[in-house]
Amino acid sequence: MPKARIVVVEDEPAIRRGVSDALRLSGYEVTEAGDGAIGLREGAAAGVDLVLLDLLLPKRDGLDVLAELRRTCPTRPVIILTARGSEDDRVRGLKMGADDYVVKPFSAKELIARVEAVLRRTMRPVPEVRLVRVGKGTIDLHRREVRWTCGTRSDLSETEAALLRYLVANKERAVSREELLSRVWGIGTAGLETRAVDMHVARLRAKLKDPAVADDDQVEVIVTVRAHGYMAGPALVAREDDP
Ligand code: CA
């Protein structure tokens, strides 16, 4: 597993230092943030694998930081650091999409165990899919080409192949544009045009049209989910065997 990058957002200097030191000792790369504003900036930065988030923070409240992180980096894992007795906040945090919480005072051992458990879950690579059937055609994601029974072939760009692989690997659910940007392009989405995703989907749809079939009879390969994102259509089927 690559060395994970963790942002520690905590205004209490002693706790922040203790947590950061324990994480560094366990081999993690750590960025410290002493208030909610810096926490949000660092937590939303590209390449961050996990955010440890205190809730009572100066400048910007922890739950507010969490809401903003969920909007800009929907898949970024967050563990809430919470004081004993503040159960309402903990529940609200989990409902808002935090991955886990740790109650203060906690031991370094307990914290590291929680961090490892969340990272094991979230740093899982996208399942490997090589061949995808689409109507009478086959998509080879390794060779990045589409082959039709009539003999026509077309090539896919690296991004198009990665986008298709992600949609097929998550076939049973709709995937938001933000998630696609973060998981396929590997970037946080703060201030980024999600229209880039739409453009790539349009190009993919054009390339996945069976040349031997009339426009009206084409199968729906990528379904648009209104106000959210996209989903692999029923016509896309991952296959195990070689054609
Ligand atoms: Ca605090």
Image (tube, helix red, strand yellow):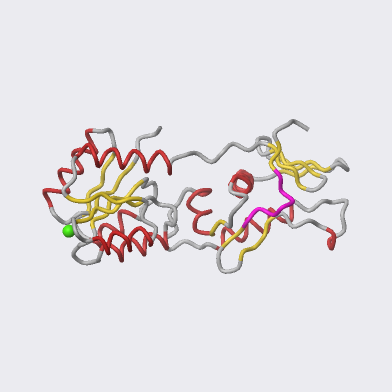
Q: Is residue 49 magenta?
A: no
Q: Which corner quadrant of the image does residue 87 belong to?
A: bottom left
Q: Is residue 199 left or right of residue 183?
A: right
Quadrant (top left, top right, bottom left, bottom right) of the C terminus: top right
Residue 195 spot, x, y in % from top left:
56, 63
Q: Residue furthest bottom?
A: 227
Q: Position of residue 234 (x, y in %)?
A: 71, 52
- Residue 93: horizontal and vertical position, in percent? 33, 60
Q: Residue at x 18, y 50 (%)?
A: 104
Q: Is residue 14 left or right of residue 121?
A: left
Q: Nearer the viewer, residue 113 or 161?
A: 113
Q: Nearer the viewer, residue 105 or 143?
A: 105
Answer with left or right where residue 133 lies relative to residue 86: right
What's the residue at 20%, 60% (across, down)?
35
Q: Is residue 118 left or right of residue 240?
A: left
Quarter residue 4 falls in: top left
Q: Quadrant of the N terminus?
A: top left
- Residue 69: image quadrant is bottom left
Judged from the image, the quadrant occupied by ligand 1 is bottom left
Give the total of numbered labels: 0
Task: Identify the residue at horizontal 82%, vertical 51% (top origin).
Answer: 210
Across and down, in percent, residue 213 comes to 87, 54
Seen as rendered, the residue at the extreme left is: 14
Q: Give the residues drawn in magenta, as a range.
A: 231-237
Q: Nearer the viewer, residue 224 or 42?
A: 224
